[in-house]
Amino acid sequence: MKVFSRKKKKEEWQWSDSSNYKRYEQLNKQPELLQKPEEPKTMETEREEPVMPHDRREEIPHSRQEKMQYVRDCCDEILESSARLTEAKKEYKAVNAYMEDVRRVKLSEEEDGGQLAYYSRRIQNLRKDQESYRNYGTKIPENMYQYISANEKDMSVILKELHDDENYMQALKTDLHNIEGEKSALIYEQKDCQKKIAGMRTIAYVIMGAMAVVLGGMFYFHLNTDYDFTIGILLSILGTALAVALIMVYYQKNVREIRLNEKKMKKAVGLLNKYRLLYANVKSRVDYTYKKLGVRNSYELNNYWRLYLTAKKERQAYHGMSRELDEAQEQYDLLIDSMGLSDSSVWKMQMEAVTDASVMKEMEDSLNRRKKGLRKTMDFNKKQIEKYKEKVKDLTRKEPDLAEEILKIVEERENSL
């Protein structure tokens, strides 16, 4: 026992030595010195047990205590190999059962007239159709779908009312714009008439002043000279009277226009107030509808209505597919369960293998690789068990005086299971 422990310490010491470490670093820099011939590749499932390194159970120790420890180690190795062998046998049995299931499934295609493949293919197609609906179906917000679904019978009325309110609101907006324009025109006309009246007054004052000067001059010359200005005075008075009369007529016309504009202005202001109130009421109602439905206008709501009709048909088809899928799945499960398979859940999940020969072949190849690897594992563990049993027997033959104690150790290990 001490020999082996000294060997291990020596190996540790060798690697701790700086010169050997430098040599190891040099080998790392020249990887071609470390190249080994390529080993044949093995499949991932073909597990081969590694070669057991040389340990202290390979040689028989000398002292009594070391011999007993040697027997215990051999018994532990036998127990460990037995556990591995049992586990491998269990898995080997399961693999055989899976391979038998594969054989039964392949035979069922001839016995049941291809019903299993038919339901498997139908289930796969229905699942693809459902997946296509989820990815490419009509997209409509769920809250909008639920609202339209709850008010489906009244949607035509809701759409018409919202459309009419929008048109009425637009008409009121246009009328308000026109009335505002008319009001502005009336204000302009009123100011223009006021300017004209002021102009007429100025002209009248000028004419009156000019005629006063002319008449005064005529009277002066008529009284102080031999000339007779009677006709001139009369004509001047007549012209002045005529001019004043024309000015008064034009003045009265503008006054009437101002009064008429004032009446029109009052009417326009009344209409503005009325239409503004109507517009505010309609706009508040339309805005509330927009906010409640989450739309910007009746066109968008109408578009959602068309999307709803399409989505409703798609959902009905989807529910129909779900019912058909459940029925097909039920029939498929009944057929699988009726075969008496060891693990029917595998075939309920991997139904592609029923319809696709390449998947079935891949499955068989995988099971064969697992079976081959398990067989190697079982053979290896059997050899290990025989090997260490033989070591214990050999020690018993060489040391008959220790047979009773060895038997006691073996019984202790068996009882510990």
Image: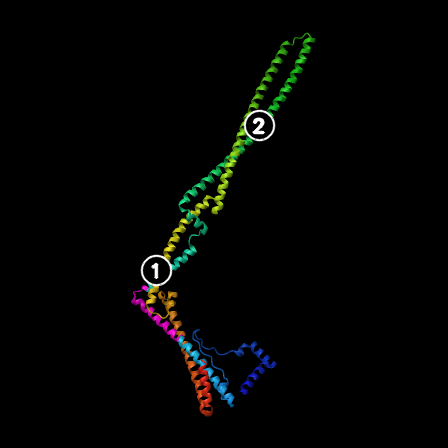
Q: Is residue 153 magenta?
A: no
Q: Residue furthest right?
A: 224
Q: Is the residue 189 above or below the residue 308 in the image?
A: above
384 or 232: nearer the viewer = 384
Q: Can see residue 164?
A: yes
On the picture, is 106 further left or further right than 177?
left
Q: List x then y, in percent, for residue 108.
A: 31, 68
Q: What is the spatial separation of the Cα atoms under label 2 and label 1, in whole angstroms?
A: 86 Å
Dots 2, 1 in contact, CB < 8 A: no
In the picture, the quarter occupied by the C terminus is bottom left
Q: Earlier in the sequence, mark 2 or mark 1?
A: 2
Residue 88 shows which numbered tag? none
Residue identifier under label 2: 190
For the point 44% across and 88% down, which residue is it?
A: 393
Callout 1 amino acid:
Glu
Q: List x then y, in percent, for residue 332.
A: 34, 63
On the picture, is 345 further left or further right than 20?
left
Q: Can see residue 391?
A: no
Residue identifier under label 1: 327
109 or 321: nearer the viewer = 321
Callout 2 amino acid:
Gln
Q: Quadrant of residue 269?
A: top right
Q: Which residues are magenta?
A: 91-115
Counting every numbered tag in the picture gives: 2
Q: List x then y, in percent, for residue 202.
A: 63, 22
Q: Quadrant of residue 156?
A: top left
Please, what is the dominant secondary structure of the magenta stretch? helix
- Disc 2 packing (10 Å; few <14; some 14–19; many ≥20): many
- Disc 1 packing (10 Å; few <14; some 14–19; many ≥20): some
